[in-house]
Image (tube, rainbow, N blue to C red):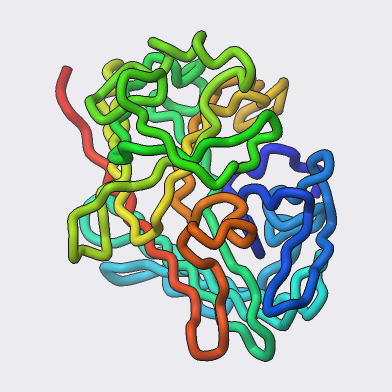
Amino acid sequence: MNDSTYFGATVGRVANRIGGAEFTLNGKHYKLVANEGNNTLHGGSRGFSDVVWKVKRYQREGPSPIVTFTYHSFDGEEGFPGDLLATVSYILTGKNQLVIIMKAKALNKPTPVNLANHAYWNLGGQNSGNILNEVIQIFGSKITIVDSKLIPTGKFASIKGTAYDFLKPQIIGSRINQLAKTKGYDINYVLDGEKGKKIKLAAKVHDKKSGRSLELYTNAPGLQFYTGNYIKDVKGKSGYVYKAHAGLCLESQAFPDSVNHPNFPSTIVTKEKPYKHYMLFKFSTKSH
């Protein structure tokens, strides 16, 4: 309950940031709980990562073990309109694959929804130090430009020739010093994807030392790449203490602050238009 890093959490009702902790929908103004300065981060001070979810389904045996959690978010929770029924399923499929499916239904009022998985990955192992030597490839040729508070301006920028360019595999720490203001990466990529295909390859990560690799596929339009810049002395497994850059986040999601930018893909969920967010994590190993 006192967690400040969102380790492994499902974040919502709206992941990432909402500028000014407010938005207008269908002519009505909504004021949210501000929990990061004047802005709302990851659903407010008591977002979906701080509530108790119910287990709807649990199947341990068989080729595809699954657990499904469900949460009923009430009308007005953290300032958001309408009742929302959210479900998150974790499924182990095939060889070394994890599928995460997030769904949400608006029960009575239209409402913004943007759920994200906030797992931190370190392919070297949880006690192997930081992720700065891992190699990443991100399949997004633009980012959403943000202000000093990490709120999007509504404009996009090409990543070509910048420290954000991971179209070709790059060592994460190779240009991180150019991002002194944010102490590392914390930015939303506009994923490219293939035309006509809903599921797109978002990112690849490889750790040369362990040989482990990860691939993320998703139907979301964006990917927030975060390098754990503000992790500070967090006690983890076996008493190991995590510090800055101990893990990286690949949060496939809608663009931040979409509800205040009509030119961004809509995050408004209605009875007729439910929410579905699909993620596939593929794991493999390569010899040195």
The residue lying at 36 percent from left, 32 percent from top is 158
Question: How far across and how far down the image is residue 101, in percent?
Answer: 43, 67
Q: Is residue 20 above or below residue 151?
A: below
For the C terminus, the quadrant is top left
Left-right relation of 193 to 248:
left
Residue 24 appears at what percent x and percent y? 72, 68
Look at 73% across and 63% down and name the residue there: 23
Residue drawn 57% across the image and 84% down it: 270
Q: Which quadrant of the figure has residue 148?
A: top right
Whether residue 287 is visible: yes
Quadrant of the image occupied by residue 163: top left
Q: Is residue 95 positioned above or below 132 on the image?
A: below
Left or right, residue 250 beside residue 287? right
> Image height check: is 201 above or below 106?
above
Asked whether 116 or 175 is in front, the reply is 175
Q: Is residue 240 visible?
A: no
> Residue drawn at (65%, 41%), measured in percent from left and top?
151
Q: How many marks?
A: 0
